[in-house]
Amino acid sequence: MFKQVSSYLSALALALFLTACAVPGQQPGELEIRSGTIEQITLVQLPSNHHAGVGAVVGGLAGLGIGSLIGGGTGRDVAMVLGTVGGAIAGNEVQKKYDQPVPGQQIIVRTTNGVLVSITQPVSQSLFQGQRVFIEGSGENARVVPR
């Protein structure tokens, strides 16, 4: 019974891990480009791009694998459970250590038609206030690039 439950849990953990790693691909099509002038640049901290919980899942799977190598019978079952829990805790702590904010900048651009647009992106040393720029894309995928 426990082996069946542990195999289901392992399969579920693997499926969650693979789902968390999936990144949508680049969509083909046109890219909206607007032009304007930078009005203001403010330095900000961007959250890291690591997926939350991946460290715990990977650590738990590693602990499960190591626990399955220990002993036999009930002892093995206990080792697998303890290994999974311990690995998940350790993996989560490791991920927290490396999950640091990334330096970024909030850029306010006045487009040629007078509309103010705010874009937050990683720091680009080539941008400065008063510079004429292009805004590529829209929404969360928009970025400011020099002309």
Image: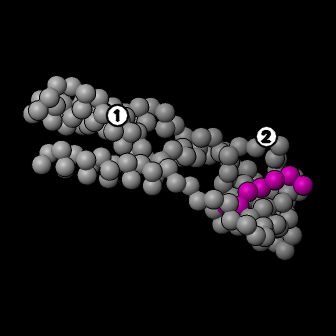
Residue 145 is covered by the magenta coloring? yes
Can residue 130 be seen at all in this image of the molecule? no
Residue 131 is covered by the magenta coloring? no
Observer-nearest residue: 12 or 135? 12
Residue where numbered disc 1 is placed: 62
Numbered range of the magenta stretch: 141-147
Place of residue 33 in the rendered image (x, y in percent of width and height, measured from the top left):
82, 66
Can residue 114 be seen at all in this image of the molecule? yes
Q: Quadrant of residue 23?
A: bottom right
Residue at 52%, 54% (x, y): give it.
22
Place of residue 42 in the rendered image (x, y in percent of width and height, measured from the top left):
68, 48
Place of residue 135 in the rendered image (x, y in percent of width and height, measured from the top left):
79, 61
Marks 1 and 2: in contact by CB < 8 Å?
no
Residue at 25%, 27% (x, y): give it.
69
Residue where numbered disc 2 is placed: 125
Disc 1 secondary structure class:
helix
Residue at the top extreme? 71
CA–CA distance in space, label 2 to label 1:
41 Å
Q: Quadrant of residue 70?
A: top left
